[in-house]
Amino acid sequence: MNIVVLNGSPKGELSVTLQYVRYAAQKFPQHTFRFFPVAQKIRKLEMDDASFREVIDAVREADAVLWAFPLYFLLVCSQYKRFIEMIFERNQLPAFQGKYAAAISTSVHFFDHTAHNYIHAICDDLQMKYLGGYSADMYDLMKKPERKRWLFFAETFADAVSRRIPTAIAYPPLTSRAFKYEPGPSAATIDAGAHKILVIVDGQEPSGNVNGLISSLTGNFRGAVEVVRLTDIDIKGGCLGCCKCGLDNVCEYEGKDGFIDFYNEKVKRADAVVFAGAIHDRYLSATWKTFFDRSFFNTHVPTLIGKKIAFLISGPLGQIPNLRQILEAYGEFQQADLAGIVTDETGDSRQMDRMLAELAGRLVRPVPEGCTRPMTFLGVGGRKIFRDEVYGKLRFVFQSDHRYYKKHGLYDFPQKNHKVRRMNLIMTLLTKVPRVRKKLLKALKDEMVKPVKYIAENR
Ligand SMILES: Cc1cc2nc3c(=O)[nH]c(=O)nc-3n(C[C@H](O)[C@H](O)[C@H](O)COP(=O)(O)O)c2cc1C
């Protein structure tokens, strides 16, 4: 069997993920694996048509395609995203159509599901036959049971391809309608006062109704709102994955392009940040992805704490719940206050005017201390993953995170709660006594509600 491996790591040969595929390739010598470092060589693929064609021709001749990628900021890295965009832009769908596909990622399992959902949806859009995704922890390959698990997946994949099993589509094609948003006259009723409102737009085409969304939102404010195009900033490239930033948040690109200054001087100093862009395939543009990946020089420390944020999206966001989850999760782990997400899906210009006016108001409306909405699983779960990773095996690389987590009380492991530990010990012992156990189980519902009921009735 002829398998094409699309290596989605900016580190190319030094990719951790790639070692998983190499391991499988060595165990299954009856299959041929062809490796293409499409993320690392993205500039070349963009500039040199022959190189891009070589990848596409290999896909066309292959029996199956393996998407092998690291998690980058809840998705694949910007370079891989760009490669995917190029497949569509250059009309190379036929090479992928009908091919079997699977995905392997490595990560620390922080939003690995959203990246896998994305790749699965891309496979469906390319009319491939998707057989499943394998999400490994970065160092799983070091463990014998995990190697066994991974080889079983690879074997099952090869078997399914050889038997040409039927597959189902999980993500139906997106439908979009032609609608031109015509913003109403600017109201300019909201005084932004000393609030610094920053609108960032990628500047990528096609941009749909993005410019209309921005002009309508900003038209609600008296005074200046800064609008910055990412294409006007000197960004030399995507994140290289070198993790040099881990020690002191100093990026490999420091002093070499304009991104870090932009992020430190504009984004971090704004009171409200509005992210605007059109949907490109199942996400925003690769340019937007570059912004998020490059912001990783702040490593696992939130940089938008307490700021208002909002998203202006042109395109069928309602059909891509995966992307909505990514945007909401971004707000939560940044500890920002998500003021809203406005899209052009209503197809009604006047309604959009009203939604944008409302959003403009929310962007400057003060929220009393401690009154932003509580985090959901997206923020709570993500925070615990980072806490454990930074405390554990990532610590010596991400030293600046460790310092921050220690200083800000983020190491809130349950084992530090001595009161709860004492209670658990006593109660566990008591449940061993049959008579007490019976009584306790009978009273459990009453006891569980008791403390909150007391507050509800007495405060
Ligand atoms: C810029 C950047 C962003 C990352 N984002 C995530 C993430 O969102 N979720 C996660 O679990 N791991 C994330 N990671 C960790 C990588 O996915 C992980 O280290 C992976 O094993 C690297 O694989 P590679 O060596 O094949 O590139 C990120 C790493 C970098 C450098």
Image: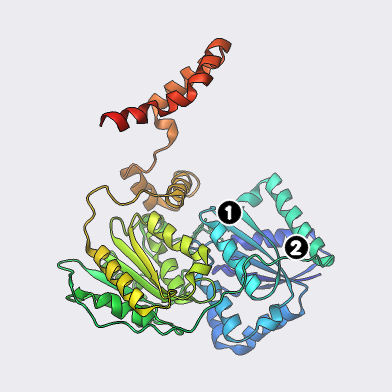
Q: What kind of element bears circle 1?
A: loop
Q: Could you say whether the residue bearing mark 2 is in a helix, strand or loop?
A: helix
Out of 260 and 326, give the one closest to the viewer.
326
Look at 58% across and 12% down and name the residue there: 434
Residue 120 position, x and y percent, is 63, 66
Is 130 left or right of 299, judged from the image as shown? right
Residue 3, how many percent across, how many down? Answer: 75, 70
Are the residues flagged by discs 2 and 1 in contact, CB closer than 8 Å? no
Instruction: Tell me if 421 is positioned left or right of 113 in this view.
Output: left
Q: Which is nearer the N-term, disc 2 or disc 1?
A: 2
Label at residue 313:
none
From this view, report whether residue 378 is shown above or below residue 6.
Answer: above
Does label 1 point to a residue whose CB lies under 8 Å from ligand 1? Answer: yes
* Type of amino acid at the residue the image marks with label 2: Ala
**For residue 136, which quarter of the picture?**
bottom right
- Report, in whole angstroms, how far the alpha carbon at label 2 lies from the one at label 1: 18 Å
Residue where numbered disc 2 is placed: 25
Three-letter code for the amino acid on which mark 1 is drawn: Met
Question: Pointer 1: what residue?
Answer: 138
Q: Residue at x 60, y 89 (%)?
A: 49
Q: Nearer the viewer, residue 322 or 67?
A: 322
- Residue 220 vertical position relative to residue 106 in the rendered view, above or below: below
